[in-house]
Amino acid sequence: MERINVIKPWIGAEEAAAASAAIESGWIAQGPKVAEFEFRFAEMVNAQYAVAVSNCTTALHLALIVAGLGPGDDVIVPSFSFIATTNAPVYVGARPVFADVELSHGNLSVATIQAALTPSTRAVILVHQGGQPADVDAIRAFCDPRGIVVIEDAACAAGSRYKDGPVGSASTIAAWSFHPRKLVTTGEGGMITTDNAEWAARAKRLREHGMSVSAADRHKSTLPTAEEYLELGFNYRMTDVQAAIGIVQLRRLPEMLARRREIVAQYQRAFADVAGVRCVADPSFGQSNFQSFWIELDDRFPLDRESLLEHLANHNISARRGIMAAHHQPPYRHNVGQPLPNTDQLTNRSLILPVYHQMTEAEIRHVINAVRAAAGQAAA
Ligand SMILES: *Cc1c(COP(=O)(O)O)cnc(C)c1O
């Protein structure tokens, strides 16, 4: 059996044809395909506006700027997240303040946010970790009246459901990623969604050097335009080649979701009787796209996390350590706030198992039986 990767993007001939058509159109930088991708993405997540950018890190940066965050402001973030979540407030001169997460779903809650509040808290970056939906309504009910902006880091969450709608539909502003480690990919890419017209318009300008007239509008205009550069901007644009790929990927999303959830259901059933293994599962208020499926080990499991990873590697399975914790990384080690016991437990004791669309039944069984064998259990 070939090595089983932790993820493989599901991308192929249709995306290649779409990219090729974009190239042949002669318009390869941000143009009509980006506009179409934005329109379709906004529709999918029930948002009024979508602004495509170069990746989710730049989406978070712009989201913080348009939401008005800057020096002197504290931004509550989960340490239990990819490092970009913590870096983003630093880019605008704000201070990231770490909050703990709930063990059951790995996300912030009202209780963990409350424990991290400071007099300068002006925003929360609410991550939908690994595609697990966070309880946006409860958190906004706490934050909105206090003037604390909830910026959602939905990097992993395209296709996840919150209550009766897609993640994104209950958002003030959300940032998305199209890195190949996520479900929908454009190679690199990101998106901001919001219902706030002013924020969307400003984000569109900021991604394009703060220009008063977009390059696409300038192209359409017959007379030379007199553009101005209204404020300090950036080049955070997506290309039409990427957007053309993204449009095809969005069409694949429902099928991708169904397949991932089916694979995860098999894992959950197969590990239900394995002592010392807890599988991440949907919270009561939504459904994950299972961008990452993790299991958490406790002392009843005969191997520790590192030994289980080694055991899986010896069986040709690439698993991964669980989600990282930013407060253990060099730039943030000095940033000592309150203790984060749940974050430490999850980051130290969990591992991410392979889930990808093309996974065969034999591959799924191989992973299941390798974990069961490590626990001294018969094959499922
Ligand atoms: C992947 C990821 C990011 C960064 O996304 P890029 O598109 O690679 O910049 C940010 N936050 C979370 C939670 C992520 O998983």
Image: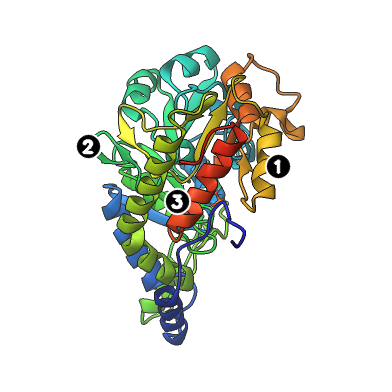
Q: Tell me the distance, in whole angstroms, between the alpha carbons under discs 1 and 2.
A: 41 Å
Residue 34 lies, with reference to residue 306, above or below; the image says: below
Q: Residues within 10 Å of mark 2 (few under 14, many from 20)?
A: few
- Disc 1 within 8 angstroms of ligand 1 (CB): no
- The spot of residue 240 in percent (x, y) is 45, 72
Q: Residues within 10 Å of mark 1 (few under 14, many from 20)?
A: some
Towards the viewer: 232 or 73: 73
Residue located beneath label 1 in the image: 310
Residue 354: in sight, yes or no?
no
Residue located beneath label 3 in the image: 203
Q: Amino acid at mark 3?
A: Ala
Towards the viewer: 13 or 336: 13
- Which residue is found at the position 32% from the left and 58% from the top? 255
Q: Amino acid at mark 2?
A: Asp
Q: Residues within 10 Å of mark 3 (few under 14, many from 20)?
A: many
Towards the viewer: 203 or 12: 12
Residue located beneath label 2 in the image: 164
Nearest-to-viewer mark from 1 and 2: 1
N-terminal label among 3 and 2: 2
- Which residue is found at the position 71% from the left and 29% from the top? 328
- Which residue is found at the position 39% from the left and 64% from the top? 249
- The spot of residue 365 in percent (x, y) is 48, 49
